[in-house]
Structure formats: C-alpha cells, structure tokens
Image (cartoon, helix red, strand yellow):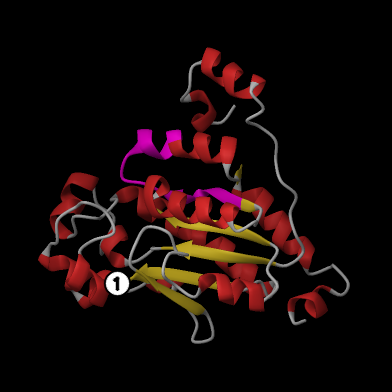
Amino acid sequence: MREWEQIFPEAERKMYEKAGYKGKEKFGINPALIIIDVITGFTGTKPMDVMDAIDEFPTSCGRVAWDALPKIQQLLHACRDAEVPVIYSTSDPDFKAAFGNATKRGIDATDFEKRATEFPEMIKPRDSEFIVRKARASAFFGTHLITYLVRKNIDCLLIAGTSTCGCVRGTVLDGYSFGYPVFVVEECVFDRSRTSHLVNLFEMNAKYASVIQLTEALDYVNQLKRIEGRKAVASY
C-alpha cells in the first residue's frame, strides 16, 4: 500500500471503497503532459529546508521540489521522445498586479521578480512547447488550454508539478470536468505540506484522477511509439 493510501484510517478507506470511489480510467493513445507551475518561485534557486526556502520565495516548497525535478525531467524526456505534446503553466504577473494572487496569500515583492517565473534549466521548455500563463489555480481557468487540447486531439492528460493541493488539484478537477481521463504521476508532483500532499493524492485518486507511479507512466509513454496510426490521430 502506498503512503497516500495509508494516510486515511482503514475504516475510512473501506467507506470510500464501498461507496464506489475506486477504479482506474483507461489510457488514451494521444496524451499530453502538463507540467504545472514548476518555476523558481515554487522550487527556489537551490535545495533547502522549506522554512529557509520560504525566506527566498514565500511560495517555495523546499527540498521536495528538488526531489521531484529529476523525475519530472525523466518523464519529460520520455514524452518528447514519444512526440507527446508538453504543456507548461506559469503565473501571469500582469493579472497578479491588478487582482492579486491565485490564493488568499498576500502580494510579496518576490512575486514580481523575473526569476520567480523562470523554469529550472533541467526542465526548461523548448521554443515549440505551449506555455499557459494563468491567473488562478487551474491551468484551464481563463486560458487557451482547452482550445489547444482540442486542436491537438488530446484524449488523456498526464499531470506533473505543484502544488498537489492547489494548482495540481485545480487543474485535475477541471481536466476531469472537461471529460479527460487524468493521470497524476505520483513522484512528479509535490507540495510544501507532506500531509496535504498525501491527502490530496488520495482524494484525487478517489474522485477525479488515477494516481500512477512514474514507472507505469514511462511504460505507457514508451508503448505509444509502437501504436500504428497514432501520429495520424494526433495530427487529424
């Protein structure tokens, strides 16, 4: 049993299961990878304990971000190799200046530092990859993401990024609401709070997504290269 499953007592797990909150959706043949808010404002400039990292950027998640980055990179490289579209999200500083943060957290001077919205070098977007600049938690809210997915004939979503309880969950909920099977890659999402991370993995898996391990995600993506006619579907 995985750690996020153990976060709930056995009696509550049985309650969810009896009510039908279980099961896994089927993978599609034309997925997209969405990397949510993996920017310096959430990772910090180097691995640090979270309380120290917050001194640099109040939104920083600390060392857990740096634990996840190599795994996100691994998934990213596999998706690129399989010609799976990759989408990044970051914050919209213009909207933030006018209307405030995506959460109730107050505005901080670091919110407007250019480096706060930069992507770490190891997962930096290519020029051809789509970047969503968002104002609220979900990568769908007020953006062109759904138009992009429709035009690309995407039929399921792989999710990486941060924070598990906030922007990841918001994007997962909207993705599911738009009718996409959603797969959260466990080792590729992170949160400043371990408890919140685990609880939200459990809840998303129960209701809106399938939480999968990186090995399964990599196997799935690698198998796509052997599907005859997949490129035709993707470019239709």
Residue 71 visible in the current orientation: no
Residue 120: x, y in percent?
37, 70
From the viewer's perspective, tell me whether residue 102 is left or right of residue 128.
left
- Circle 1 packing at 10 Å, graded few (<14), some (14-19), many (20+), is many
Vertical relation: 47 (above or below) 234: above
Disc 1 marks which residue?
Answer: 117
Q: Which residue sits furthest top?
A: 11
Residue 133, how many percent across, how many down?
38, 74
Residue in view at x 15 percent, y 66 percent: 110
Q: List the single residue furthest toward the right.
A: 228
- Vertical placement of residue 49 versus 135, above or below: above
Quarter where residue 111 is shown: bottom left
Quarter of the rendering containing residue 46: bottom left
> Residue 28 location in percent, x, y?
75, 59
Q: Can residue 39 be seen?
A: yes
Magenta range? 183-199
- Residue 210 sits in quarter: top right
Between 2 and 31, the one nearer to me in the picture? 31
Of residue 161 and residue 166, the one placed in the foreground of this image is: 166
Residue drawn 39% across and 63% down?
38
Residue 195 painted magenta: yes
Is residue 98 a member of the stretch shown in magenta? no
What amino acid is labelled 1 in the image? Answer: Thr
Residue found 29% across the figure and 66% down from its top: 40
Q: Is residue 4 left or right of residue 32?
A: left
Q: Relative to 34, is 61 on the left or the right?
A: left
